[in-house]
Amino acid sequence: MPYASNDDLPPSVRGHLPQHAQDIYRAAFNHAFAAHAADVAREEIAHRIAWAAVKRSYDKDGDRWVPRGKSQN
């Protein structure tokens, strides 16, 4: 189901992503969920697309997500 706010996101997203990354995730998920309305796996597809959208702008640095180009690795 689409997410109305970042507070509605799954704990695995809220607890790990910074606020801006949560915004990206929510927008990408909601768009993909609507775009794949006829697909029986639409929720799984939407989550995968949302994570891919986050990974275009953020990198994982240890246990933190940081804007791309800002990681210490």
Image (tube, grey):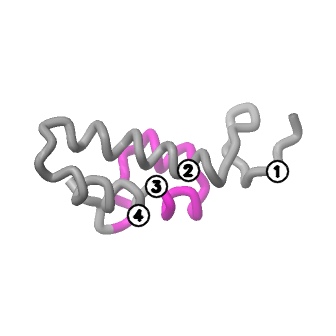
Instruction: Give how far across and how far down residue 42 sits, in percent.
Output: 21, 43
Q: In the rendered structure, are the residues bearing label 3 and label 4 in contact, judged by CB atoms less than 8 Å apart?
A: yes
**Residue type marked 3:** Tyr
Residue found at the far bottom of this picture: 4
Describe residue 22's horizontal placement relative to residue 72 as left or right. left
Instruction: Give how far across and how far down residue 13 sits, in percent.
Output: 46, 45
- Which of the marked residues, 1 or 2, is nearer the chain's N terminus? 2
- Which of the marked residues, 1 or 3, is nearer the chain's N terminus? 3
Find disc 3 in the rendering and name its residue: 25
Mark on residue 54?
Answer: 2
**Residue type marked 2:** Val
**For the residues marked 2 and 3, what is the alpha-carbon distance in whole angstroms?**
6 Å
Q: Residue at x 82, y 44 (%)?
A: 71
Find disc 1 in the rendering and name its residue: 69
**For the residues marked 2 and 4, what is the alpha-carbon distance in whole angstroms?**
10 Å
Q: Residue at x 48, y 43 (%)?
A: 51
Mark on residue 42?
Answer: none
**For the residues marked 1 and 2, what is the alpha-carbon distance in whole angstroms?**
14 Å
Q: Residues within 10 Å of mark 2 (few under 14, many from 20)?
A: many
Mark on residue 27?
Answer: 4
**For the residues marked 3 and 4, what is the alpha-carbon distance in whole angstroms?**
6 Å
Q: In the rendered structure, are the residues bearing label 2 and label 3 in contact, judged by CB atoms less than 8 Å apart?
A: yes
Residue found at the far right of this picture: 72
The magenta span reads 5-24
- Which of the marked residues, 2 or 3, is nearer the chain's N terminus? 3
Q: Residues within 10 Å of mark 4 (few under 14, many from 20)?
A: some
**Residue type marked 4:** Ala
Helix, strand or loop at disc 1? loop
Q: Mostly what secondary structure, the magenta segment? A: helix
Q: Is residue 62 magenta?
A: no
> Camera-side residue: 34 or 59?
34
